[in-house]
Amino acid sequence: MIIAFWISLFIAAYTFVGYGFLLYFIIKIKRAIKGKPVLPVVADDELPTCTLVVAAYNEEHFIAQKIANSLQLNYPEGKLKFVFVTDGSSDRTAEIIAQHPQIQLLHRPERAGKIAAVHRAMEYVDTEVVVFTDANTFLNPEAITRICRHYSDKTVGAVAGEKRVQIDASADASAAGEGFYWKYESALKKWDSELYSVVGAAGELFSVRRSLYQDVPADTVLDDFMISMLIAAKGYRIIYEPEAYALETASENVSEELKRKIRIAAGGIQSILRLKALLLPFKFPVLSFQYVSHRVLRWTVTPFFLILAFITNFAIAFAGKGVIYEVLFGGQVLFYSLAILGYIMEERHIRIKILFIPYYFCVMNYAVIAGIVRYFTTRQSSVWEKAQRKI
């Protein structure tokens, strides 16, 4: 039981904290040997041609702002195209887009899911680079330039932008927790990129070389992750560019965020099963290390090890095996008590931000377990009801 406890505690700690410390330490050594990486400097006439692809479903509340934001992006004249696809939209989304001749509108009344819409949009993309972004996110003016400069390096097959969550003073647990989570994720992605490659890209903002893009199966849940990782599996790197960012509002509430996280967790299991080759360290030594440490552990065993660590720690502490076990168990009890208190405060709409982190942490790990159950017990569909966002 003691062995089981320490293994469980080690894996949980490594997954959420240890990998970050190890990665930072490796990067420090790499910089001491090779120096800090230099960002590429590319003249306007050397930047690749690019298409911005936006898949939108019933986004009439955001689409006018998205169009204005897209048309204000700074990129050399004549090198940036816009393709918006709105399959299945039953509101005014397509009507609003149609008012802008600069944008190529692809609309069908049938709803087949986001990835089907992306596949159809890609048939119209003939530029060197394609950038994907969500309809409810807004990019900084230099985002496309910052992304596309990296394609001067022939080893780069994809570039991931940064996701930022808009948080105001009245933020609830979904906003504050998600915001903290993405700040930590951004740091990990920055170090992953510097070591070798980012482990997948987020759909809010990422790009790929058009020549390397390949369609993923129609039932793919995490299409952004799969598209980017298939390129990594070809031996190309995914670079992280924090100076290109997508700003979005948080989920409307924790329930909506939980719905989104469960879907992501189910998609994570699907992705792991379909990307089995990336688990082979002799073929992808550094990438496999990053992939397992940053993604696979989170999406598979770690939530169960958290439960095992609590149960075994309880048994060992009350068996009188040593003060260290009593202290560790007390720490666990305190953490989960704060999470429960955070839930109670959230239900009563009382904002105590210090409680958001343990609460959101528990919500995330519950979502992984629920997502695994969902994947193996129900049929997955790429057509899903999106989480409601704050407007």
Image (tube, grey):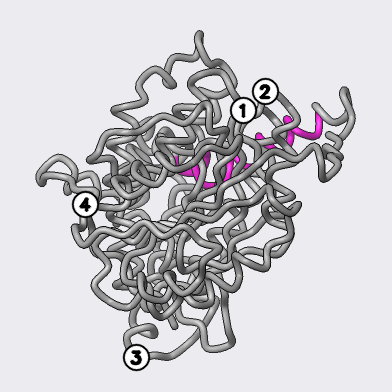
Local SS, label 1: strand
| Residue at screen point 51% across, 8% down | 282
Choose mark 4 or mark 2, whichever is in front. Answer: 4
Local SS, label 4: loop
1 or 4: tag closer to the N-terminus: 4
Reading the image, the residue beneath label 4 is 112
The reply to whether the C-beta atoms of the residues labelled 1 and 2 are less than 8 Å apart is yes
Viewer-side residue, 374 vs 66: 66
| Residue at screen point 82% across, 45% down | 44
Reading the image, the residue beneath label 2 is 155
Choose mark 4 or mark 3, whichever is in front. Answer: 4
User: Mark on residue 285?
Assistant: none
Viewer-side residue, 211 vs 2: 211
Which class describes the residues within 10 Å of circle 4: few (<14), some (14-19), or many (20+)? some
Reading the image, the residue beneath label 3 is 348
Task: Give amino acid for label 3.
Answer: Arg
Q: Which residues are magenta?
A: 12-29
